[in-house]
């Protein structure tokens, strides 16, 4: 099949440009993305047309010596990053001199460093262990400190959803102040983990707007009465005057007072010699300003070209330029929890949603962040705690499919066996409210818990399947609640761009579309969207390196490696870096239909949705074969047919009217955030769309009435708690 006979919607714009003119894209430049999650570090090598050439992953430990005290080590994390970068570069087979940009993302955790020697600083509960110098985002030790900060009512709290979360970093710093000797606390300086990584890589004290505005109480200059970002009055009000000393030195300084603050991907500096040696790269590689991991997911997904037109999305972009085009695209970055991130040109305040944060992604633009504390963790909990879990594991293993694929298939069979109208109707009298770990958005109440109405004593796999269906429905209904809150506040949301392993779950994707009424876009890279986003930050930074390289070439000079650094091919060619934790990029799961049918009784059911080809990562990539090997999206491909309780997704069509408007001749309008947006659009590639069922369909009507019950369950729980607390308070007084 020729390249030109296929649907071009699956190609990145840089690939389309190559098809038109082989000299239009510099294919000698590569980028590295580094993603530090809660449980592992990953690195990926990305080429200039958006292919992930290779990826490596290594686990990182977390220590919990006491309940709610969860720590990690920057030393272990940096060593894991170094391993992953070297491994992925080796597997990609590219020259390290051609890797000109690197970007980092990480969890929003507090890294503490000794100011005098830049070494790790112990954060307790064992203060003698300096290796444990990160207070993880999920650490909940700072309960009292969070209450004290929120009691101030300071204007800065307005920009973190009205109250500071216990997951943020200022409460953690305040806890350290309360629990360390004064002279010891004076020795510490503080970083969000992503900013620590760019510091480790470059030696620079530059901080990101993303880390400081989103998690540390920093209000960008010009917002409200802020002059230098940090508020002297606020920090003194919360009894942290040490952070004010020497123009906020322990926090990296301040804009206008010697400190440097950057938006996503702006150049921090080149890799220093030690970091280049650790990572197996060169000091010609520039570091882009990092972001919190969920925001890297935003970068890696929302510029995807969709395989079918989304009319509301096209209409909303008609008069926009640059990164303003991303407004209305809600990124849902799903994992253990899910973050919901949306950009706007103007500040929009949403009750129970963090932000709005200015300058985080691009100067002058605002981002809001909602979230669900448990999504992936919720589904795992529902499966693991059900009496039929062992039986499910046996059946799924025997069928050679995932537990979720098996349950989705079993639900289809049950709908036939029970003569139900659809899969959704199987749970019509089961009312599942799943805030097991509190509510992040939009109620913003950490005391919220789960409540299930309609359970029986059934302990079969069938009961587990229906309970799992109800849990998926809860995730989708709560997403609708967040979307409605954001919409009513002023966001004009047109679509949801998903990422994470949950994208493979056709049942959950269909429920999200039908509950919210919005099309769901599933990206080219499912699990790899975040690390891909980090690589795009490196691509933005690399623009300066490319200019430098081209300038050097024009003077007939070439890049030279640092004298103490050998080329990677020489330094590790005899080193076995293979690891059981090295993983390829996410590959769309393929359901073994015949195996499931045999295991569940031979029922007829449609195949779960065909997901974006998250192609198996080759050790080497030849650009001439890229379109055929990695983007084989034939026009004659089978029509998507998701779990059948909603309308099937339309057959993929060629979007010729879009191709005509791709501006491949380079004639582009300029707008704020253009550089980052250009990189995102040119490298992101295609995304599959799950279209919601018609609003008057039976399942949409059922889900609509169950949404009202969902809201009532939340309100009733709060009311019950108030009644009980009222009695308890009266008893305590008497």
Image: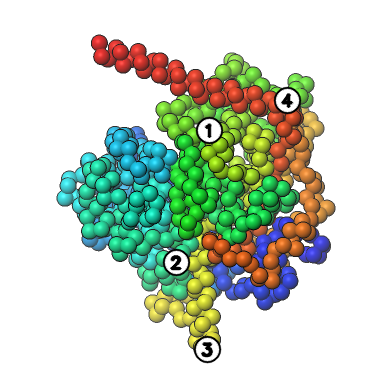
- Frontmost of labels 4 and 3 is 3
Name the residue: 30% across, 50% down: 231
Q: Residues within 10 Å of mark 1 (few under 14, many from 20)?
A: many
Q: Is residue 686 left or right of residue 43?
A: right
Q: Which mark is residue 267?
A: 2
CA separation in Å, label 4 and label 1: 23 Å
In the picture, the quarter occupied by the C terminus is top left
Q: Earlier in the sequence, mark 2 or mark 3?
A: 2
**Kind of element beneath mark 3:** loop
CA separation in Å, label 2 and label 3: 26 Å
Q: Earlier in the sequence, mark 1 or mark 2?
A: 2
Name the residue: 30% across, 59% down: 253
Q: Earlier in the sequence, mark 3 or mark 1?
A: 1
Q: Which mark is residue 378?
A: 1
Q: Residues within 10 Å of mark 4 (few under 14, many from 20)?
A: many
CA separation in Å, label 2 and label 4: 55 Å
Q: Mark 2 and 3 residues: CB-CB less than 8 Å, in contact?
A: no
Up/down of 730 relative to 168, above or below:
above
Q: Mark 2 and 4 residues: CB-CB less than 8 Å, in contact?
A: no
Rendering coords of residue 67 (x, y %):
34, 34
**Residue holding disc 4:** 414
**Kind of element beneath mark 2:** strand
CA separation in Å, label 4 and label 3: 71 Å
Q: Residues within 10 Å of mark 3 (few under 14, many from 20)?
A: few
Name the residue: 59% across, 31% down: 477
Rendering coords of residue 119 (x, y %):
28, 58
Q: Is residue 505 left or right of residue 582?
A: right
**Residue holding disc 3:** 556
Rendering coords of residue 627 (x, y %):
72, 63
**Kind of element beneath mark 1:** helix
């Amino acid at each position: 099949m020729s390249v030109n006979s296929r649907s071009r919607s699956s190609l990145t714009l840089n690939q389309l440009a190559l098809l038109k003119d082989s000299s239009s894209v510099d294919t000698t430049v590569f980028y590295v993305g580094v993603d530090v999650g809660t449980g592992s570090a990953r690195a990926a090598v990305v080429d200039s047309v958006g292919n992930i050439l290779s990826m490596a992953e290594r686990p990182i430990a977390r220590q919990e010596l006491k309940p709610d005290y969860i720590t990690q080590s920057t030393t272990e994390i940096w060593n894991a990053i170094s391993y992953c970068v070297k491994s992925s570069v080796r597997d990609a087979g590219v020259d390290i001199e051609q890797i000109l940009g690197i970007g980092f993302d990480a969890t929003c955790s507090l890294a503490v460093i000794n100011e005098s020697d830049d070494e790790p600083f112990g954060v307790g509960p064992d203060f003698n262990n300096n290796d444990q110098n990160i207070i993880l985002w999920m650490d909940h030790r700072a309960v009292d400190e969070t209450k004290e900060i929120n009691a101030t009512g300071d204007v800065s709290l307005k920009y973190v959803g009205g109250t500071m979360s216990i997951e943020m970093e200022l409460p953690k710093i305040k806890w350290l102040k309360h629990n360390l000797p004064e002279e010891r606390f004076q020795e510490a300086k503080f970083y969000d983990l992503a900013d620590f990584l760019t510091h480790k890589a470059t030696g620079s004290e530059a901080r990101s707007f993303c880390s400081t505005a989103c998690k540390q109480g920093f209000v960008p200059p010009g917002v409200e009465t802020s002059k230098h970002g940090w508020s002297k009055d606020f920090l003194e009000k919360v009894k942290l005057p040490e952070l004010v000393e020497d123009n906020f030195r322990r926090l990296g300084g301040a804009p206008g007072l010697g400190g440097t603050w950057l938006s996503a991907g702006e150049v921090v500096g080149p890799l220093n010699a030690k970091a280049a040696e650790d990572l197996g790269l060169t000091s010609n590689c520039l570091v882009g300003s990092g972001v919190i991991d969920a925001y890297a997911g935003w970068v890696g997904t929302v510029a995807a070209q969709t395989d079918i037109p989304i009319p509301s999305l096209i209409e909303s972009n008609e008069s926009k330029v640059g990164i303003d085009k991303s407004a209305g695209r809600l990124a849902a970055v799903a994992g253990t929890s899910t973050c919901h991130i949306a950009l706007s040109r103007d500040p929009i305040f949403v009750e129970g949603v963090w932000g709005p944060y200015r300058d985080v992604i691009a100067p002058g633009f605002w981002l809001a962040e909602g979230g669900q504390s448990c999504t992936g963790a919720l589904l795992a909990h529902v499966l693991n705690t059900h009496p039929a879990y062992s039986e499910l594991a046996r059946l799924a293993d025997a069928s050679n499919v995932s537990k979720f694929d098996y349950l989705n298939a079993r639900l289809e069979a049950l709908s036939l066996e029970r003569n139900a109208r659809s899969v959704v109707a199987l749970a019509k009298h089961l009312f599942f409210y799943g805030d097991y770990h509190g509510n992040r958005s939009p109620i913003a109440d950490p005391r919220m818990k789960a409540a299930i109405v309609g359970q029986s004593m059934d302990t079969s796999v069938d009961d587990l399947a229906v309970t799992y269906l109800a849990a998926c429905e809860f995730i989708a209904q709560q997403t609708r609640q967040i979307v409605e809150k954001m919409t009513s506040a002023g966001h004009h949301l047109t679509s949801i761009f998903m990422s994470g392993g949950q994208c493979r779950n056709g049942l959950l994707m269909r429920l999200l579309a039908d509950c919210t009424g919005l099309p769901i876009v599933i990206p080219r890279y499912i699990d790899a969207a975040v690390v891909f986003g980090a690589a795009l930050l490196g691509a933005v930074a690399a623009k300066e390196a490319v200019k430098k390289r081209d300038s050097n070439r024009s003077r007939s000079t070439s890049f030279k490696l640092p004298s103490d650094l050998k080329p990677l091919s020489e330094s590790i060619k005899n080193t076995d870096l293979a690891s059981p934790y090295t993983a390829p990029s996410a590959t769309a799961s393929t359901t073994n239909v015949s195996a499931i049918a045999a295991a569940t009784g031979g029922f007829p059911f449609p195949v779960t949705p065909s997901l974006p080809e998250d192609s198996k990562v080759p050790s080497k990539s030849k650009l001439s074969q890229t379109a055929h090997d990695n983007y084989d999206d034939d026009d004659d491909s089978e029509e998507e047919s998701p779990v059948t309780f909603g309308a099937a997704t339309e057959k993929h069509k060629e979007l010729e009217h879009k191709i005509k408007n791709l501006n491949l001749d380079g004639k582009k309008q300029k707008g704020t955030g253009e550089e980052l947006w250009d990189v995102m659009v040119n490298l992101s590639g295609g995304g599959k769309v799950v279209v919601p069922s018609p609003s008057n369909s039976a399942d949409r009507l059922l889900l609509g009435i169950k949404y009202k019950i969902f809201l009532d369950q939340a309100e009733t729980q709060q009311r019950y708690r108030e009644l009980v607390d009222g009695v308890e308070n009266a008893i305590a007084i008497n």
